[in-house]
Each structure stands twice: as C-alpha cells, then as structure tokens.
Image: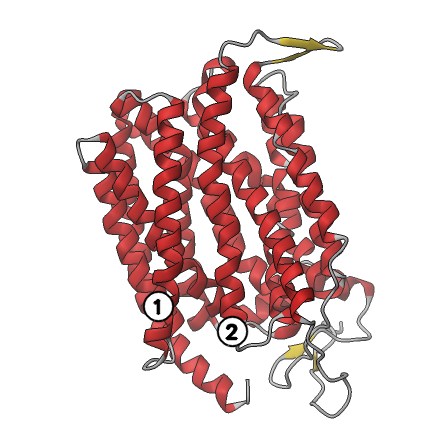
Amino acid sequence: MSGPAPLAPAPEADGAYPPKEWPTPPQRYWALFAITFATFVTFFDQAVFGMLAERIKQDFGLTDGQLGFIGGPAAIICYLFVGIPLARLADIWPRKYVLSGGIAVVGLITALGGLAQNFIQFVGSRVFLAAGGSAHAPSSYSMIADAFPPRVITRAFALLQFGFIGGMTLGPLIGGMLIVMTQNWEPSYILGIRILGWQWILIWIAAPAILASLIFLTVREPQRQAPVADVEQPPADASFGRKIITFMGWDAAKAIHANGKVYYPLFAALALSATEVFGLAFWRMPFMARTFGWDPAQIGAAISLAALIGSLAGLVLGAVLVEMLGKRYKDANVRAAFICFCGTTVSTLTALAVPSAWGSVVAFGFAGMFGLAGAVPQNAAIQRVAPNSMRGQVTAFYLFMFTFFGAMGSFVIGLVAQYVVGDPMRLREALLLTAGVLLPLACFLMFRAMKPYRTEIARLEALGR
C-alpha cells in the first residue's frame, strides 16, 4: 500500500512567482477599515450577549451551568468541525469573499437567537455562530500580512485593536441601555412566534454585520506572498483524498508539530488565558450585580468607561513596550506578551478581591489595558513564524485555542460556581478560584516560550525572512 503523496518543496525565488506588488496606501487602509469594522461587530455582539446573561437565565429558567453553556460551548461546537477547513479557504480563495460570507453568517445567526422559543432552540442558534466567526481572524490576519509591508505591519495590527476596543466598550454601554429600555416590554407575537423584549436586541444588532459583509465586497484583494523554500508544501498533483486531508489542516498541523517547541507553549498560554479572560467577560455583569447590587445601566456605563481608557492606554503601552524590547531582544514579541500576562493576572485578581464596586471597575480597566497591550505582540509573534502558504490554517489552529477555550470559559466558571462554590451569591469565590489557577499557569507558559521563539527568529533571519 502506498503512503500519502510526498509534499512538494516550495519553489525558490527564481521567477516561479511574480514579484510582490503591495497595495497602495488607500487600498490597504480601506481593507484594514473593513476588517476592523467586522472585528468591532463581532466583539460588540459578544459584549451585548454577555450583558443579556441575567435576562436569559431568568426568562428561560436556567441554572448557572446552562447559562455558561449558552455563552460558551454552544457557540464553538460548530467550530470543531468547520473552523480549520474554513481557514484553509483563507489560503486558497479570495479572502474578501470569505470574510464577507463569514460576517453575514454571524449576523444571521445572531438574529435567529432573537426568535428562539426555549433553551434548546437558543442553544441551536448559538451552535452555528462560530461557523462564520471562525473564518474571520485567519482571513483577516492573512490579508493584513499581504497588504502591509513588514515595516508597517505592527502598526496595522495595532490599529486593528480599535475594532476590539470599540466592541468591548460600546457593547456594555449600548447593551445596558437597551436592556433597561426593553425590560418592561411585553412579549411580541409575530406569526405565532413569541419575541421577548431582550430578544429584539439580538435582532437589532444583526444589522451592522450585514453592512460589514457588503463593505468587504469593495475591498481590493492583495497579492499573496510566495512560499519560502524551507517549508514543504502540499503536493500540486495530489489525489482528491489527499486534498481533503490538506483542507482539514493536516499539513498545517505537521508544520506546527515540527516546530512544537515554538508553537506549543504559545498555544497553551493563550488557551489558559482565554478561558479565564473571556469567561470573566461573560460573568462580569452577574458578578457586579450579585456582589455590589448594581443594575445593568450602571454596570454598562462603568465597564465601558474603564474598558475605553484601559484599551487606549493598552495600545500605547503595547507599542512602547515592543519597540523598547525590540532594540535588545529577538524575542521581543513573546517577552512583551509575558510582561502583559503578568499585569493582567495581578489586575484581575485585584478586581475580584477588592471590597468596593468602583475599585473593582478600576482594576478591571487595568486588566483590560494589559490584555490589549499583549494582544498585538501575540498576534505578530505567530504571523512572524507561520509559513506563508499555510498562514491561514496555522493562524486558525492558534486562534482555535483562543476561540475554543475562550468560549469554554463561561461554562467552566458556571460549573465552578454551581458545583464547587454552590451558592449563586458567592460568585466572587468561583471567579477568584479560576483566575488564581489559570492566569499564573498562562504566565509560566509564556515565559517558557521565549527561548525557543528567540532561536526560531534567528533561524528565519538566517534564511532571509
């Protein structure tokens, strides 16, 4: 029996690929605007959905465990089956169409959640949400890497964070206002379908996703960079079965495993931190309400202000830190991420432990600052070492840790609150327990990633990359 077809080495720079032509500044920044706006829509949806947590629990009669499941695992079940294959599309299809279709799916599924009549239907609507979202980050990062020359790519990733800042800042603010506005609405009935007041919010926030989908159609697709000679490529004349294996991520997984000393600590650190950070983002509104007695409008306004100030400060901190470390260390990206992980850990534990509501809000702001400051070097680190021809799927594997474990965070915290702590009014203890375990472990793994990453950068520089 013959084995799989051997991988073909990448062509040398001998004319097999046309010279790289970079998009003009207006073209590349319009593409970045489209990506940033879609990123805003994605995180805005997540933030508003987190603000709805208590209303969902009350109207559907859910336990904390069920509520955590809706906020997390329900949204990533589909990712397990389609996330990596969809990321392959970022490597072989025009990325603007992949991005357009993906964000349109996000809007459609979000709106369908506004029509759910019970817990099962609501879970069903969230199951397919990740199908669209899974295509966004790999395609976005791949497009940015091909649209911006290396000398300015860090600036592009920094500007991309404004999508995250806008979504996480305006989401709680607008979400809190909409919850207060609709809290006394009577259920509406359309064609026999009951729509609760808060479900209209899900229907309304689907509109920006459709707009983002249309904007992507106006973007100029950038020319892809040629593969480098030191990375094996999928065989050009492979059988249909072999192509399916490639599409499912086999070759990208092999590339990751071959360089496991570099990738695995980065992947694991991201997984642990995402579990805690996104789990806490979902449970922050219930924490503030149960611990300090604040209403959704108060929580939304305070958290939005803290997130805005912290995020803007984080952009400055991240840029200054990476630039300063880059003058002395080849591992500047990972080293900066480690420092920011430590800052996030201290700030998060402080936010959960302080006795005052405003003290908690301020500490959450610092946690957001360090979190955002570390996001740019983390993303840049992976893009720096990922093979050009597999960047989409390598990025998808990396972001799978972010998406999967981040989505699991709300479920994990819900289970800890329900089965370990056992008292809904002692949610603070469940949050402290998970943060006290997961975040220090993430810091340790990021520290362990510095040496192998530094070695890999030296190797790539020797190859002219």
Q: Residues within 10 Å of mark 2 (few under 14, many from 20)?
A: some
Q: Classify residue 200 as left or right of residue 93.
A: left
Q: Which SS class for mark 1? A: helix
Q: Position of residue 399 (x, y in %)?
A: 53, 55
Q: Position of residue 226 (x, y in %)?
A: 69, 79
Task: Tell which of 324 and 273 is nearer to you.
Answer: 324
Type of the residue with mark 2:
Arg
Q: Is residue 350 above or below residue 399?
A: above
Disc number placed over residue 335 in the picture, else none? none
* Rendered-image quadrant of the N terminus: bottom right
Q: Position of residue 234 (x, y in %)?
A: 71, 73
Tally of numbered tags: 2
Q: Classify residue 60 as left or right of residue 34.
A: left
If you read the primary sequence from the N terminus, does the residue marked by circle 2 or circle 1 appear first? 1
Residue at image x 63%, y 27%?
A: 204
Q: Please, which colouring scheme is shown?
A: secondary structure
Type of the residue with mark 1:
Val
Q: Residues within 10 Å of mark 1 (few under 14, many from 20)?
A: some
Residue at image x 51%, y 23%?
A: 178
Q: Which SS class for mark 2? A: helix
Q: Position of residue 322 (x, y in %)?
A: 37, 70
Query: Does residue 398 appear in this view?
Result: yes
Disc 1 target residue: 320
Q: Is residue 124 above or below residue 386?
A: above
* Rendered-image quadrant of the C terminus: bottom right
Disc 2 target residue: 384
